[in-house]
Image (cartoon, rainbow, N blue to C red):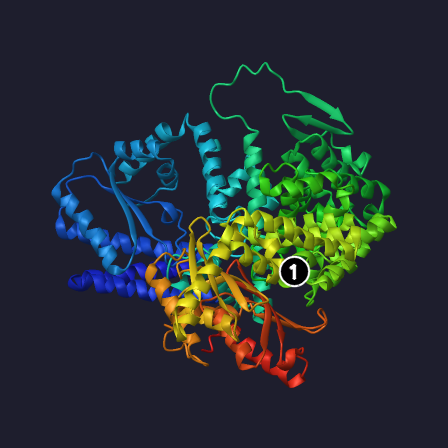
């Protein structure tokens, strides 16, 4: 019986044939019209909920209809009696699989019996390709004889893979069958092991290029882990293994189980539908599911949540669940395939693998197996001990044991969770330094971790609406633990201090447990997830029956996991009150050491780029000062001043003798924070620029005498330039410097402002171009310096005439605001003398200038600032006062500054 879809295809083919043969002169327009009408019908079908695979197949079938009519018509026009050469046209790649999405290329191969063909045949091929391009298709094409195709396939495994799915379109069927037979005989048989090894290596390489995680913030639908390519990969390998190309056949050969096959097909269909929508939205072959696209797709797919963030969260949770299914199922299938010997002569095989039996298990060839079917029936707690054996003996779970554990997850109930055997085994696993991450990831992949620690379960595939998080909440947690494992074995100098702390840590189990639980409160959607995480950690602590000391350590680490990084980056470390308050939070040296390691793991687990040298330096300053305070109280903070003397001697040795008085003044007037951040070489260079400024000031009169001195230092390895600006401090100076950088279209990544007691200042900026490269053009240098000098010559300077507005950047910024709202927090509690204002918002060109102008417009004075950029997110903190140096407490003034800052964060106000 013909289905409605088949009838529609039949009618479309008939209609096209009649029109094309009646109006030969207008054939291209007819084909364009056919494509437009049918694509519109497919789009309606997709929008109404059509499956990803069936819509893609229908599109492929319509292209088949168009292509056959087009090619046959061209052949009739150039060779009414038929082409003198046998020709077959075949589809390959996504077109060969019948999986075309709206912007997919049409990949075709003209297959010939020999390399040399007649000019008539060449003309027919040329006209066909030209017509396809004129109709609007992007065509990938090749023209080969059978020997050429075979040779190319054997020399390039990518080409070989595309030819696996080669599909007949039109032409000489016998020639096509001959090619398929020779392809199997000459390109597949005897080459199974080579292809299998290459496919696995190629898959790893592709994954590495696309983030190497299912749970990327902006995943690649095609090439990411768990993407479309992973599904296709097991079919390609399956063909070389068993000459099968469907998941149903893989079930027959026991590489897949039927429930896995159903989940795999459902997930693949979903991804094809997502990719189709992405192509519709962007109008191009888009494979990266960006933050902006996530909102569009979630809305177009009619997720019911009212708020855009909740819609995105629901959509991405389904997306990650499906890609996780593809990843885990295809990985299991590949592991099963590895256990089956390749076709061909068997090895002598007299060497038997070493087998060890213990506790109802067997280890063989580096894998752990259940000894028999009764292993878990005899002792249910072998379920968790399997992971301990895996850890201690450095084994992997066999596919059979993984399947067995999944089927027994129902046994991990409340009784199991509260049992002494389960908690002791779990704590034993957590206590093994450097060996925990792999085990917890395996537990999570199998679904066991969520059963054992139900507080962790809601984090699975949970999207994090935070600018700098690269992963979902569960993946972030596991990556943090893996990063901590790596510290124990790290050889790099920058990890030496952390490695020492980790080696000396007496209770690693509580640190690992704290990392596992540090974000569990995020699922509650509370403003401060730390509090919710701490409450859930209390529950876990009771279930594990931790001692009071271990429980206090766990809760402190979970509740304060952000404190060390936040305090180091956003607070004045020269202020004794900052150190005292932080020391009160951590309580003791053991907690401080563990929190230092947790902070490192959390930072590195957020993103590889998130843990910068600059941030690390601040964290270590806070760690050392807090450590000293915990040991010696206020006297320890006083002893820090003695270090100035040693540093001063080192600086003096690097400068000529006539710098003596300048060195004394510099050390007398610079804040402690400055002396902690820079070494003797850097301070000596700063003194030179101070001298240059003073000499210029003495030589010139009027406005020229006010011009600051600049030093530009390109840092190509870091992708930015460092800029030193030295001159007199004055009101709204930072705003004018930011405006000068903006006038040259330079983006400020970070800023450190140091004002001496004698009113001289040195401000150190890290800036880059709009292409995210160091600033090296002397014209940019001159523009910034000239603009700043002009602005300092008048009381109020308007930068708007110098700023070239970038409308593309502004529109991008506004679109992102819907998905990632800015965060502005005003704090009048943390410091006795200043109001603290913390801002997190997507970075853009001119953001700092707009924020500083907002402060100026509100009449707010900036006493100290911390300006940083991480993962394209501005993280800025300001210590501010109002008139007479008072804190900002007036309710109307607070509302006004909040309004101005929000406006500045969302769009430029200059």
In front: 33, or 645? 645
Q: Quadrant of the C terminus?
A: bottom left
Q: Quadrant of the N terminus?
A: bottom left
Q: Residue furthest bottom?
A: 892
Residue ID at (77%, 50%):
591
Please give the count of numbered marks on the rendered protein. 1
Residue ID at (81%, 36%):
379
Circle 1 is placed at which residue position? 566
Residue 354 point in image, percent of width and height = 66, 20
Q: Is residue 806 visible?
A: no
Residue ID at (71%, 27%):
362
In screen coordinates, is 629 left or right of 147? Answer: right
Residue 627 point in image, percent of width and height = 74, 51
In screen coordinates, is 309 left or right of 697? Answer: right
Q: Secondary structure at mark 1?
A: helix
Residue 487 point in image, percent of width and height = 64, 41
In front: 724, or 188? 724
Q: Residues within 10 Å of mark 1 (few under 14, many from 20)?
A: few
Q: Residue furthest front?
A: 658
Residue 899's place in the image compared with 58, above or below, is: below
Q: Is residue 746 visible?
A: yes
Residue 783's place in the image compared with 887, above or below, is: above
In front: 45, or 749? 749
In front: 260, or 752? 752
In screen coordinates, is 431 left or right of 329? Answer: right
Residue 188 point in image, percent of width and height = 40, 30
């Amino acid at each position: 019986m013909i289905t409605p879809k088949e009838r529609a295809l039949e009618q479309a083919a008939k209609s096209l044939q009649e029109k094309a043969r009646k109006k030969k002169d207008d054939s291209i327009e007819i084909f364009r019209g056919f494509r437009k009408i049918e694509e519109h019908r497919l789009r309606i079908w997709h929008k109404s909920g059509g499956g990803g695979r069936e819509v893609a197949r229908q599109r492929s079938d319509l292209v088949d209809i168009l292509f056959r009519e087009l090619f046959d018509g061209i052949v009739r026009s150039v060779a009414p009696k038929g082409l003198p050469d046998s020709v077959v046209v075949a589809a390959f790649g996504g077109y060969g699989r019948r999986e075309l999405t709206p912007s997919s290329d049409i990949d075709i191969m003209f297959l010939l019996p020999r390399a040399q063909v007649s000019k008539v045949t060449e003309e027919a091929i040329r006209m066909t390709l030209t017509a396809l391009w004129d109709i609007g298709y992007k065509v990938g094409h090749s023209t080969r004889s059978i020997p050429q195709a075979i040779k190319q396939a054997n020399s390039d495994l990518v080409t070989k893979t595309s030819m696996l799915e080669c599909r007949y379109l039109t032409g000489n069927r016998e020639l096509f069958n001959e090619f398929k037979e020779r392809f199997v005989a000459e390109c597949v048989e005897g080459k199974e092991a080579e292809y299998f090894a290459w496919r696995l290596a190629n898959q790893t390489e592709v994954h590495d290029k696309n983030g190497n995680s299912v749970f990327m913030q902006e995943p690649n639908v095609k090439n990411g882990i768990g993407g479309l390519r992973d599904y296709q990969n097991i079919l390609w390998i399956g063909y070389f293994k068993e000459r099968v190309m469907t998941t149903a056949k893989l079930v027959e050969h026991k590489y897949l189980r039927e429930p896995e096959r159903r989940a795999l097909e459902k997930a693949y269909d979903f991804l094809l539908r997502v990719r189709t929508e992405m192509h519709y939205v962007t109008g191009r072959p888009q494979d990266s599911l960006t933050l902006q696209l996530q909102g569009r797709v979630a809305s177009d797919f009619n997720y019911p949540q009212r708020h855009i963030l909740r819609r995105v969260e629901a959509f991405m949770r389904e997306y990650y669940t499906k890609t996780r299914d593809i990843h885990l199922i295809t990985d299991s299938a590949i592991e099963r395939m590895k256990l089956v010997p390749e076709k061909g002569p068997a090895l002598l095989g007299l060497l038997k693998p070493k087998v060890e039996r213990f506790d109802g298990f067997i280890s063989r060839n580096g894998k752990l197996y259940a000894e028999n079917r009764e292993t878990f029936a005899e002792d249910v707690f072998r379920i968790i001990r399997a992971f301990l054996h895996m850890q201690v003996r450095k084994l992997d779970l066999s596919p059979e044991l993984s399947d067995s554990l999944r089927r027994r997850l129902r046994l991990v109930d409340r009784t199991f969770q509260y049992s002494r055997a389960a908690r002791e085994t779990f704590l034993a696993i957590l206590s093994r330094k450097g060996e925990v991450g792999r085990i917890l990831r395996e537990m999570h992949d199998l679904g066991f971790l969520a059963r054992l620690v139900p507080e962790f379960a809601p984090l699975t595939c949970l999207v994090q609406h935070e600018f700098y998080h690269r992963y979902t909440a569960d993946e972030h947690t596991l990556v943090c633990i893996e990063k901590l494992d790596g510290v124990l074995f790290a050889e790099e100098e920058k990890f030496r201090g952390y490695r020492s702390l980790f080696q000396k840590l007496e209770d690693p189990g509580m640190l690992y447990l704290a990392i596992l639980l540090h974000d569990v409160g995020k699922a509650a959607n509370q403003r401060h997830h730390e509090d919710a995480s701490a409450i859930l950690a209390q529950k876990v602590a009771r279930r594990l029956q931790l001692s009071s000391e271990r429980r206090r350590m766990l809760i402190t680490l979970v509740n304060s996991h952000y404190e060390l990084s936040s305090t180091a980056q956003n607070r004045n470390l020269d202020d004794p009150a900052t150190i005292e308050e932080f020391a009160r939070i951590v309580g003791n040296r053991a907690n401080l050491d563990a929190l230092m390691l947790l902070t490192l793991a959390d930072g590195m687990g957020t993103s590889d780029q998130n843990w910068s040298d600059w941030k690390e330096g601040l964290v270590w300053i806070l760690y050392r000062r807090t450590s000293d305070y915990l040991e010696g109280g206020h006297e320890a903070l006083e002893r820090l001043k003695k270090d100035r003397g040693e540093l001063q001697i080192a600086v003096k040795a690097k400068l000529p003798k006539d710098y003596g008085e300048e060195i004394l003044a510099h050390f007398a007037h610079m804040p402690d924070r400055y002396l902690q951040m820079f070494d003797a070489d850097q301070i000596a260079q700063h003194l030179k620029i101070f001298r240059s400024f003073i000499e210029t000031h003495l030589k010139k009169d009027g406005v020229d005498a006010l011009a600051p001195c600049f030093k530009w230092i390109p840092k190509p390895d870091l992708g930015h330039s460092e800029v030193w600006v030295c001159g007199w401090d004055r009101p709204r100076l930072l705003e004018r410097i930011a405006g000068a950088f903006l006038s040259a279209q330079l983006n400020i990544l970070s800023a450190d402002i140091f004002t001496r007691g004698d009113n001289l200042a040195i401000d150190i900026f890290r800036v880059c171009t709009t292409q995210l490269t160091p600033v090296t053009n002397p014209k940019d240098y001159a523009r910034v310096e000239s603009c700043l000098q002009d602005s300092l010559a008048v009381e109020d300077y308007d930068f708007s005439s110098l700023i070239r507005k970038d409308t593309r950047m502004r529109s991008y910024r506004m679109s992102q605001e819907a998905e990632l709202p800015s965060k502005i927090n005003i704090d009048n509690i943390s410091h006795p003398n200043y109001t603290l204002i913390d801002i997190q918002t997507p970075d853009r060109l001119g953001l700092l200038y707009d924020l500083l102008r907002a402060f100026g417009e509100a009449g707010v004075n900036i006493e100290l600032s911390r300006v940083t950029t991480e993962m394209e997110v501005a993280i800025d903190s300001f210590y501010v006062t109002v008139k007479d140096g008072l804190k900002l407490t007036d309710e109307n003034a607070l509302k006004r500054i909040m309004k101005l800052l929000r406006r500045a964060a969302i769009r430029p106000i200059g």
